[in-house]
Image: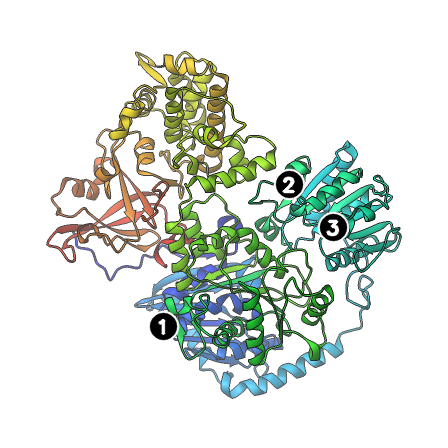
Amino acid sequence: MSAINFTKSLQYSGPEFVSNNAEEGRKVISAIESELKRCESFFISVAFITAGGLSPLLMTLKELEGKNIPGRILTTNFLMFNDPKILDKLSQFSNIELRIFDAQGSDVGFHTKGYGFHLEDEFTIIVGSSNMTLHALTRNKEWNVHYSSHKQESFVMSVLEEFESLWAADETKTYVDYIDTYRMLYEQYNDSTKKQLPAVVDTNINESNQVPKVLQPNSMQSYVMERFTELYQSGANKGLLISATGTGKTYASAFAVSSVKPKRVLFLVHREQVARQAMESYQRVIGDSVTYGVLSGAAKGFSETYLFATMQMMSKPDCYERFSPTDFDVIVIDEAHRAGSESYHRIMEYFRPKFWFAMTASPERTDDFDIYKLFDYNIIHEIRLQHALEADLLCPFHYFGIGQLSDGITTYEGDEAQSIFANEWDYQTRARLILEQCNFYGYSGERVKGLVFCHSIEEAQELSKAFNQLGMRTISLSGADSQEIREEAIQRLSGLDANDALDYIMTVDIFNEGIDMPEVNQVVMVRGTESPIVFVQQLGRGLRRHNSKDYVVVLDFIGNFNNNFMIPVALSGDVSHNKDSLRYYVQEGTRVIPGASTIHFDAIAQERIFKSIDTAKFTQIKHIRQAYKNLKYKLGRIPKLIDFENYGSIDISLIFNSNAKTYYKFLVDYEKDYTHRFSSVEAKILEYMGQYMVLGKRVHELYVLEGLLKGEVNPLTYMRTKLLGLGIPCTTHTERNIINLFTGQFKTGSSKAGFKDALLCDEVVDGLQISTVFREALENEGFRDMVEDYVKVGFQRNQKYYSQRYEEASFTLYQKYTYEDVCQLMEWETSIVPLNIGGYKYDEATKTYPVFINYDKGEDIADTIRYEDKLLSPQQLIAISKSGVDLSNNLVQKALHAKKEGITMHLFIRKNKNDEDGAKEFYYLGHIHATGEAEVFTMPGTTKKAVRIMYDLETPIREDLYDYFVNH
């Protein structure tokens, strides 16, 4: 048996293809960042660099600067494409040397697109089609090769030699020596190019504001038109449009409402400024064929065809009684989540239009107001943030979660950085630190146009004063400010008048919704995230598209708050509350978020969010109750389990892992309209099914249940026939495993006794038959309905998450499984208590050998179990045996000779084992094979021996998961 050669850590699996593929969670920028974060030095040679391409890399480059990781960047003046301001930005990094290849003074062009990284004796090259531009790194169709090898390998040597040749070429100039010349040439070139362009008359542009005279609906708006027309013509009276901020809800309503040619339309809002903006939007869509007016405290339009009124004004009896209840064919309610108020109630009681058209970006509420019921559960269309990004309806954003603060001289982190929220520093210091980050991460456009969301009115006022003392032009706004003051401030922020411009508006929440400022190119959050709804509302202030910006920068200053887990919930739109999914999103958000947007957290911010996730108790009933309430409001009835899946609500496993243990018990305790009551045995049957069947991780149990519901004499035969039709093997081990599951023999440990009377089946000579207690239970209509719901949701989850079986196994690659899931799906006769499994377990009957690895070891782990398991590459692993064994140990020998003995080894890894609630799940990563390299060592801090074993993974770990495991 050969010892492990640790210098041979690099596995040559050949080149990998790097591209942008949203469905597979791949972006070129993620591959580049992954290598930057682990390298000892790097070089980049690209023809084109844009602000949008540099911006999402700024946090990573800043981290490298802090570690003194040297880098060299070579670019060019080819076509005078690169803005000198971008080169200036790169030059500010003390660890980066920047040079410019003078293609203007050469007879050859410069088109290189390569990224190189050095780590010990390893060189990694990413070369292909991607310049350092936003869309090349995130969403364009790009072809790149990712290749790692030693320096002496011919391909690597060729790339390195070519780069060094260009770096030292006569045409190559240093930034310091050439930037002044380049700046002059760049300005001359761009001035002359503009003069040479022919005058183009665009008939879709008006002279005042460069807004198209005749607008065309986008994909979302077209669908809304079609759906609204269907409802309107069917005689429906109400409908609700749920659409993310920035997607164009107002325009969508204008296209839809005008398409049915109403005689009169009323548009209700909560602020006059919003009314005027909505009126302008309608004018752009409909034109001058109708009349428009505003009805508010300051404006008294009453007779116009399209009337835009504030709710405060229209809710007064002496106002609405000036109209006939049937005057308006369509009434549009903006920000309809406010429609539960008494004022809206009076309006809706009085008017009788043909259709109420309601709009909101956030229908979820924490009170008991049911917005869905108010609008007859007719959802015209629903498009949330993630879907809007997928559809390219919003401006891309670069989000930076900041926990570490620096003013360029001193770096503050930990408790010091926390004090920016605790008011322990004077506002001048806080403003200086915040502004340093604002300047570093920058903005898209000619000047900054920023919104700063603060914790309190006092904070907004004081930060505004402090920013102004630092040379910025800012103002603070609150609900106390008049409409005129707000409008003036918005105009100064958004407008073109540089002399009177504002750089920032500081506010608390008056701009959370209902305001249109598409020019905003920087959003700054200096308050804790208490609600995903508010977070998305404030983020949305910058997501409207505008021709003055290519992207928006979002800076979130993250303190040490218990609710920090809400940040990944808000950004991802994932309300399943799966902790590992949230951790994954914090680390790999850029890969997952659709389109050209990116997400980054610095190390301190990550640590704070992870702590919040670790300590959050998502199985607490309060979280489940809120999700349940939201879903019930949307449906207008008591949800079934299948509804949680169909409507993207919480992961139903949270219900089964909560104190309720079953959906039935939850409904009994918290739903007054639920009237079914079952016996204690029936409740235990449902609890047992919830543990082993309803999550759909394997289809076998579901077919047995389906057979039982259908009255099959032998449900095991029914299952066998169904599996045969799917090409799924059904062995004697399979059948014994299923028989034990349904007769109560599979479960072990102290909890087994609690289910002794809750048996679904009895074992008979040729298989299974329904038990008396289960047959009698199914005669209860409510019980049978719940079992049918269990089976339906199980089949749906299996099809959605677990239908792609890995080779002969019942596992799906990259899905997550508990210890007990593994015992069940490996067809063992009984489950094994997790403590008796530890890091691995061998089952002689099935010749299966799962290996479980906790990749992050907690600080409180004893030295004797602090195993140094390590992924060396996406397809190579060093795993450590249990302590107190050597090479002669039976299980060590079986691992080393598994292939020879016909043993199948499976790998399961989880990132974190410190979840305080919920199931302990591992990612399934396929088969592994011992390479034959192993060695005995003494575990640090102990006298115990253990064995290191090298394994090859049959299937290389997916890039994003590998990065999640090893790089953070």
Pick the front one: 155 or 721: 721
Q: Position of residue 922 (x, y in %)?
A: 34, 43
Which is in the foreground here, disc 3 or disc 2? 3
Q: Nearer the viewer, mark 1 or mark 3?
A: 3
For badge 3, the amino acid type reads Met
Outermost residue on the front side: it is 318
Helix, strand or loop at label 1? It is loop
Q: Could you tell me which quadrant the C terminus lies in?
A: bottom left
**How many labels were placed on the picture?**
3
Circle 2: residue type:
Ile
Q: Which residue bears the numbered disc 2?
A: 371
Q: In the rendered image, is residue 823 in sight?
A: yes
Above or below, comparing residue 734 to residue 229 in the picture: above
- In the picture, the disc for residue 311 is 3
Badge 2 or badge 1: first in the primary sequence: 1
Compared to residue 310, the image places residue 575 above or below, namely above
Give the image location of residue 120, x and y in percent. Answer: 30, 68
